[in-house]
Image (cartoon, rainbow, N blue to C red):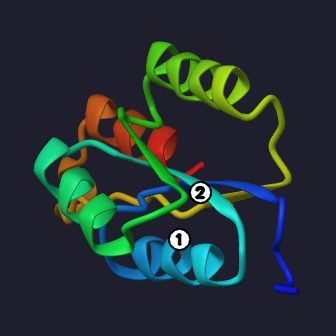
């Protein structure tokens, strides 16, 4: 028996890097994983590489409607969430005195 048998996980930013590796490991441990990310081609590639027990939902974690759609999909397909890995992150390097309010808000909304 695997440690995560029967568990349902959501991994934001799950199409690459640490999020992808986490999603892959969770599936290997028996979980069903929902991964989300902004770019459809990367999500499709991640799904193909993981191969089983995974659903992808394209979206941006800073957009409420996208989060509603993600959690609606999870509710419809599995009816529960056992684990959430809030892995999404954004970097927008700028000179400190030149950071715009819009840029600050975007970074904060994704990384918070």
Residue 15 x/y as whole percent: 32, 62
How crowded pointer 2 is (Cα within 10 Å; few <14, some 14-19, many 20+) is rated as many
Q: Quadrant of residue 5?
A: bottom right
Q: Secondary structure at mark 1?
A: helix
Would you place residue 62 above or below residue 6 in this image?
above
Q: Secondary structure at mark 2?
A: strand
- Mark carried by residue 69: none
State the residue in front, 44 or 20: 44
How crowded pointer 1 is (Cα within 10 Å; few <14, some 14-19, many 20+) is rated as many
Give me the residue at 26% from left, 53% from top.
43
User: Quick check: 68 left or right of 76?
Assistant: left
State the residue in front, 70 or 92: 70
Residue 67 x/y as whole percent: 54, 26
- Mark 1 sits on what residue? 23
Give me the residue at 65% from left, 57% from top.
32
Would you place residue 68 above or below residue 23 in this image?
above
């Amino acid at each position: 028996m695997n440690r995560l048998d029967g568990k349902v996980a959501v991994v934001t930013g799950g199409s690459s890097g640490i999020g992808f590796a986490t999603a892959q490991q969770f599936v290997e441990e028996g979980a069903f994983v929902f991964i989300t990310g902004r770019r459809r081609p990367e999500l499709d590639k991640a799904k193909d590489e993981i191969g089983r027990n995974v659903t992808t939902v394209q979206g941006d974690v800073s957009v409420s409607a996208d989060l509603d759609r993600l959690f609606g999909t999870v509710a419809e397909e599995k009816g529960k969430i056992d684990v959430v890995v809030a892995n999404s992150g954004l970097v927008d390097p700028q000179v400190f005195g030149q950071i715009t309010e819009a840029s600050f808000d975007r970074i904060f909304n994704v990384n918070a």
